[in-house]
Amino acid sequence: MIRILLFGPQGAGKGTIGAMMVDKYGIPLIGTGQMLRDAIKEETELGKTAKGYMDKGNLVPAELVAGIVNERVQKENKGYILDGFPRNLEQAEMFDQMDDVDYIIVFEVPKDMSLYRLSGRRTCKECGAVYNVNPDGFPHPKEEGRCDKCGGELIQRDDDKPEAIEQRLKTYQRETKPILERYKHKVFTLDATLPVDQIFEKTTEIIDKKEARK
Ligand SMILES: [Zn+2]
C-alpha cells in the first residue's frame, strides 16, 4: 500500500509527474474535481448531496469533500496518489480521521518560474485545448495563436493572467504551509525546476528506498 499526497503550486508539473507515477506503481492519480464528478455520476449518497449544493451554485462544504475523498480512497487497496486534497488545515485534520498517509511529495518552484510557466498558457476559444506559447512551453502550437486541433483562436483565460495567478499562489502558500507542518516527518521536498525525468527519478528514489525497508 502506497499512499501519496502531491503538493505544489500550479505550474510545478504535478500532473505530469503524477501520471508517470501511475504507470510505475499501478495506483490511481485522483484529483478532487474528478472525484466529485465521479461521485455524482455514480449517484453515491454523498455525491447526491454534493450535487444539491452545486446545482444551487454553492460551494461543496469541506466536510462533504472530505467524505467523498474518503469514500473513494477506501476502495483503493493498493494505494493512491491524491492531488488537490487536503487543500487547507481543516481538510487535513478531517483526512487524519479517515486514513493515514505515507508520503507527502512537495514540488517546489520559485514564484517567478511558476508565474513564467503559467503566463504562457493559452486556451483554444473553440475546443478548450491548452497550449503553452513560451519558447520552452509544451505543447507549443504549430501556428502562432491558432489551435492545432481545430484552428480556433488561442486566448489567455482571465485566471491565467498575472494578477489572478499571483493571488492563487498566495492562497497556496498561506494554506499549504500549516499542512506541511502537520505532516512534517513524511514530507519530501523536491526542486521542480529540474527537467521532468530528473524530478521523476528523485520522486521514485524516495519511495522505492522507503518501500524496500517495509
Ligand atoms: Zn481548438
Image (cartoon, rainbow, N blue to C red):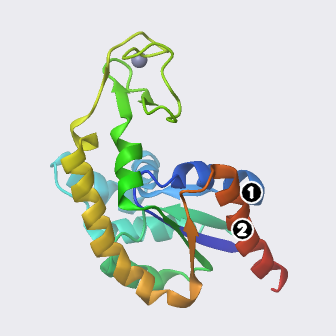
Q: Is residue 191 above or below residue 128?
A: below
Q: Quadrant of residue 172?
A: bottom left
Residue under the image location 35 percent in, 65 percent down = 65
Q: Is residue 54 above or below residue 49?
A: above
**Helix, strand or loop under label 2:** loop
Along the polypeptide, which appears first: circle 2 or circle 1? 1
* Label at residue 130: none
Contact, CB < 8 Å: mark 2 with mark 1?
yes
Q: CA distance from mark 2 to mark 1?
A: 8 Å
Query: For the residue marked with disc 1, what is the amino acid?
Result: Gly
- Given residues 140 and 99, the one toward you in this image is 140
Q: Is residue 52 visible?
A: no
**Helix, strand or loop under label 1:** loop
Q: Which residue is mark 2?
A: 78
Q: Which residue is mark 1?
A: 26
Residue under the image location 36 percent in, 74 percent down = 176
Where residue 123 appears, as percent x and y from the top left, is 35, 28
Q: Is residue 145 above or below residue 200?
A: above
Q: Is residue 25 left or right of residue 134?
A: right
Where residue 198 appears, as percent x and y from the top left, is 69, 57
Q: Is residue 30 left or right of residue 97?
A: right
- Quarter, ligand 1: top left
Residue under the image location 43 percent in, 88 percent down = 182
